Image: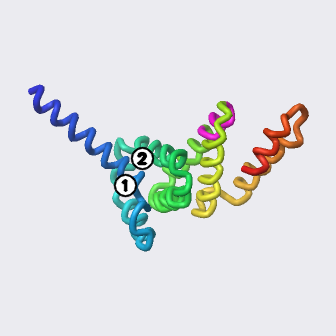
Amino acid sequence: MSGKRRRDEEESESFEQRLVNLVVRIGDKNVQDLPLHLETLASTLSPDIKGDSRDLIIDSIFDAVRALQPKSAVYGTLVGLINVQHSAVAEEAVSKLQSELQEALDDHAPLSIRGLCRFAAELMNARVLTCASVASLLESLLNVEAEEGVLPCRAEWFATL
């Protein structure tokens, strides 16, 4: 019986790893067919979003957004395509974006802040976020310069974000 349990655990791990690999590797090769690949991935993830893998999918997207910042447009579009079928997932992604961005600001993690701001702009392009909300986010980052006692280098960094 322990052999069957081990095999089930290996299948579960391999499923989770394959799911993460699908999300992370989208757009790596054959960029010409990227729109088709994104639509296929969104429809492939649809049954898993309804199931237990929703958090894994969202976490994988955010890990990729932080680590693979040049592909923010790809992940923003993927969330937008998922939003068409499952609006609750997009709501969770926006909520997670807010909490992750606040955590990055609290931790003074400039690369994460930049990646998450790029992702917010891409979510706007995918019509998940409104233009006003993204503009408000960027304005609030620029308002750091007007605060008293802020180091000039910190204010300049937020301005270049």
Amino acid beneath label 1: Leu
For the record, the magenta segment spans 100-106
- Asked whether residue 110 is drawn in magenta, I would say no
Amino acid beneath label 2: Ile
- Residue 128 screen position, x and y as percent: 59, 58
Please identify the quarter of the rendering in which residue 22 is found. Answer: bottom left
User: Which residue occupies the foreground of this view, 131 or 161?
Assistant: 161
Q: Dots 2 and 1: beta carbons under 8 Å?
A: yes
Name the main secondary structure of what is drawn in magenta: helix
Measure the C-alpha gap from mark 2 to mark 1: 8 Å
Please identify the quarter of the rendering in which residue 131 is found. Answer: bottom right
63 on left or right of 30: right
Residue located 44% across and 45% down the image = 60
Secondary structure at numbered mark 2: helix
- Residue 73 screen position, x and y as percent: 55, 60
- Residue 13 screen position, x and y as percent: 27, 39
N-term mark: 2 or 1: 1
User: Which residue occupies the foreground of this view, 88 or 144?
Assistant: 144
* Tag 1 residue: 45
Secondary structure at numbered mark 1: helix
User: Which residue occupies the foreground of this view, 82 or 145?
Assistant: 145
88 on left or right of 11: right
Q: Label 1: few (<14), some or many (≥20) within 10 Å?
A: some
